[in-house]
Amino acid sequence: AEAWYIKAIKANYTDPVAKLYLADAKKAQEKYNEALIEYNNYKKEVPSDPRGEDGAKSCELAQKWKDGATRYKVENVALINTKDPDFAPSYADKKYNKLYFTSMRPGVLGGTTEDPTIGEFYSDIFETLMDKNGKWNTPTSLPAPLNSKDNEGLSSVSKKGDVMFFTRCMVDKKNVTYNQLWSSAKKGASWGEPVKLPFCIDTLKFASPCISPDGQTLFFASNMSGGQGDNDIWMVKYEKKSSAWGKPINLGPGINTPGNDVYPFMHEDGTLYFSSTGHLGMGGLDIFKAEKKGDDQWGNVTNMKYPINSAGDDFGIIFEGKKERGYLSSNREGTKGADDIWSFVLPPLLFTIEGVVSDCKFKEVVPGVVIKLVGSDGSSVETKTDAAGYYKFAENGTARYVNPNTSYVLTTQVGVDIKTVQAAQGFFTSSDRVKETTVGVEEAKTYKHDFCLVPIQKEVRFPDVLYLLGKADLEHPSNPRDSLNFLYQTLVDNPTFVIELSSHTDYRGSDPANQKLSEARAKSCVDYLISKGINPARLKFKGYGEKRPLEVDANLDGTIDYVLSEKYIVKETKGKSKEEYEALMQKNRRTVFAVLSKDFIDPNAPKDVPVTTPTPPKPEGEEEGE
């Protein structure tokens, strides 16, 4: 067709519609950039015709959708397709292992003669069953009285499997086609004598029926008066009181267009799917969906995009219950010759969170560390690092640890084993808490987060807890409570630890005064942690005054480099500024802690939580600067 339109234009064919048809032909071949040029040429000559503007927009969208394809996977169901038209699939039972579809292959009940209106074989409704390996077997035509010498197809079976609705197209002696809707009730294992639905009028077209999941509403396409265009989507209610079908209702301009709107499908979640040439699309018929807005109201029509749609005709979509998989019909590239049935599936979004846990000081990996993942969906899972310090949250069979549209908090829990409460040797967990989210993420993604753990060996300063001169309360303007939250989080992350909190002063002032002040300061920190909910039984405190100046470890082997004694400070700051002197003095004014034991058992913990008491370790001096 493209070549003929090009010849017509070169021959100065006066009707500009040749440019429109050339654009349509190029669009059908996915030549979107070339089609865009022709649509714009047509728009210049006939600015009043919206087909030029709509065609140009559709080409821009089609190329965009193809470049940024959705995650759906679409495949030709080669086992049941032929070189003849095979289309309009529908599930025939609630187990979804029987499929009906329309076919115009040889062997139909209409015989080998061709339908004079279209020059092809008559169509029948065919059946295929899924075997134990998930493969469809060789299709067979349904017997009479459901199929006949006329055209049958486009079926829809009630969820109970007891009623079928389908289209029968009869041709009179003048080759005029009458498309009507029929129904057939199940009688045992067979279908009964079909009955034409009462609202169908012989002079009009009725096709592509779809019964709602509750069996009370029938959707269909028709060219009845009162519509928006060539064919519209309508619905009709079954009235239980009168045991009869009511009056058909047009779904209105929010769904229907001046073009063809056909092949409705009602999803179990209330979403309406249909095909249309009137809404902006990628080719001929495109598949769209509309959200349920209320009783018998739908809106927000959106294109299903590529690869559900293509440059060809895409129609007759069905879903397997609430799952994101099913079948559709298409004559896209890759068919066996005409319309084919294609399967589609939306693969699950796979997210992975992984990383390595190492020693903060020596950068060596730490095996056996428990990593906990808590989701906003209420999920909570744990895993342990392997011999290489590696952890990973991904999939375990059918279980997914990291779900779509969920926010997560990731923490190290060195003091907790998955099956037993058991302290890890030589480390306490840092207060690292990583937040991640999969909300709005539409592509598979791997999140990488490494943790480092602080060895329980030497004094480790945490953010300074400062005090007013000669005071022990926490009213310093720097808000020292924020500093203590580091230690609070450490205790939360290591629920079996019992610690001693101790304070130190510099050497100024008398020994008794410094001793008393350091004890008061240590107690104020303990009181604050208790107020935050830490069990008092896990907290000890002690003041050391000026007796223990800071030992500075600056060597890789862990040996002490120097001690901030009075003698050392005086020597190092001789001839230097007062600020340098005060900086060294400040290092000695610190609050630190020591891990006394790692076997605390909360008496209020649930009794069914397995607890293993490890061998009590020797007290280790874990001091953390304020």
Image (cartoon, rainbow, N blue to C red):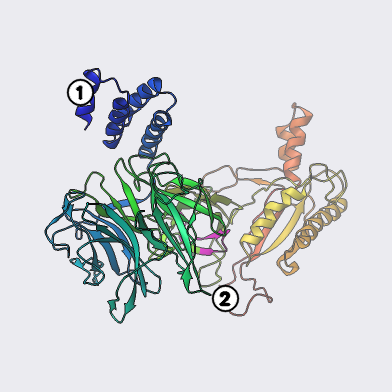
Q: How many marks?
A: 2
Image point 58% across, 42% down: which residue? 554
Res 140 seen here: yes
Drawn side of residue 351 relative to residue 132, left or right: right
Specify the amino acid type for callout 2: Val
Q: Magenta stretch?
A: 365-381
Residue 34: quarter of image: top left
Residue corresponding to mark 1: 7
> Compared to 400, does 483 lie above or below?
above
Specify the amino acid type for callout 1: Lys
Taking the view exactly as shown, the residue that stands out farthest to the left is 112
Label 1 and label 2: CA atoms lie apart by: 86 Å
Q: Nearer the viewer, residue 421 or 318?
A: 318
Residue 399: quarter of image: bottom left
Q: Nearer the viewer, residue 426 or 211?
A: 211
Q: Nearer the viewer, residue 275 or 251?
A: 251
In the rendered image, residue 551, in percent from the top left (x then y), is placed at 66, 47
In the rendered image, residue 129, in percent from the top left (x then y), is placed at 24, 70
Residue corresponding to mark 2: 611
Q: Secondary structure at mark 1?
A: helix
Q: Cβ–Cβ below 8 Å for labels 1 and 2?
A: no
Drawn side of residue 232 relative to residue 618, left or right: left
Image point 60% across, 45% down: which residue? 553
> Compared to 254, does 495 lie above or below?
below
In the rendered image, residue 195, in percent from the top left (x then y), is placed at 34, 70
Drawn side of residue 373 relative to residue 125, left or right: right
In the rendered image, residue 158, in percent from the top left (x then y), is placed at 39, 70
Q: Dividing the image into 4 quarters, which one contains the N terminus?
A: top left
